[in-house]
Image (tube, rainbow, N blue to C red):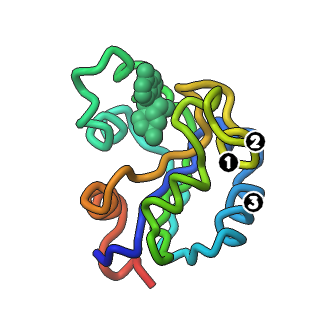
Amino acid sequence: MSGNQTFTMIKPETVGKNNIGAVLKMINEAGFRIKAMKFTHLTKKQAGDFYAVHADKYFYEELTSFMSSGPIVAAILEKENAVADFRTLIGATNPANAAEGTIRKIFAESLSHNAIHGSDSEENAAIESDFFFSKVERF
Ligand code: CMP
């Protein structure tokens, strides 16, 4: 994967509140191009596999239950400096600490229901993108 790509998931509470379009608009207006996109509902097992890096954390059970509680939108996004710029756009993991105007500040409810996921490194962006998308699903 190119260093100009990152991976995102619009989380179940954001989908449930009918905010997919509003979030995608902010992503597009920040200069990201959508390279791949999927509307899907993770099983508990799939959510556990995706977040396996957190398997030893106290919040793993809550995280994987929540992420499999309703549909999500998964996407690969492209832009120069994609990983860092996307993390700036979405704001701090805990929305209580998120800057004004960020996606989490606007849409998130709490640390566990924090509206959207963004990869924390280029390496993880590649791993997370490969979890959801084959080569022929990327444009
Ligand atoms: P995300 O960027 O999807 O990566 C892991 C998720 O775990 C994180 O967003 C939060 O929604 C969730 N989470 C729940 N509790 C915590 C915590 N104490 N620290 C970090 N992440 C947490």
The residues tagged by marks 1 and 2 sit, at their Cα atoms, a distance apart of 5 Å
**Quarter of the figure with residue 124:** bottom left
Quadrant observed for ligand 1 in the rendered image: top left
Q: How many marks?
A: 3
Q: Position of residue 56 (x, y in %)?
A: 22, 21
The residues tagged by marks 3 and 2 sit, at their Cα atoms, a distance apart of 14 Å
The residues tagged by marks 1 and 3 sit, at their Cα atoms, a distance apart of 12 Å
Tell me which label, 3 or 2, sits earlier in the chain: 3
Q: Which of the two residues, 74 or 39, is positioned nearer the viewer here?
A: 74
Q: Nearer the viewer, mark 3 or mark 2?
A: 2
The numbered disc on residue 21 is 3
Please state which amino acid type lies under the numbered disc 1.
Ile
The numbered disc on residue 103 is 1
Q: At 61% across and 30% down in the image, what residue appears?
A: 97
Question: Would the CB of label 2 be found within 8 Å of ligand 1?
Answer: no
Q: Position of residue 118 (x, y in %)?
A: 47, 51
Q: At 31% across and 78% down in the image, what residue appears?
A: 2
Q: Position of residue 36 (x, y in %)?
A: 47, 73
Reading the image, the residue beneath label 2 is: 106
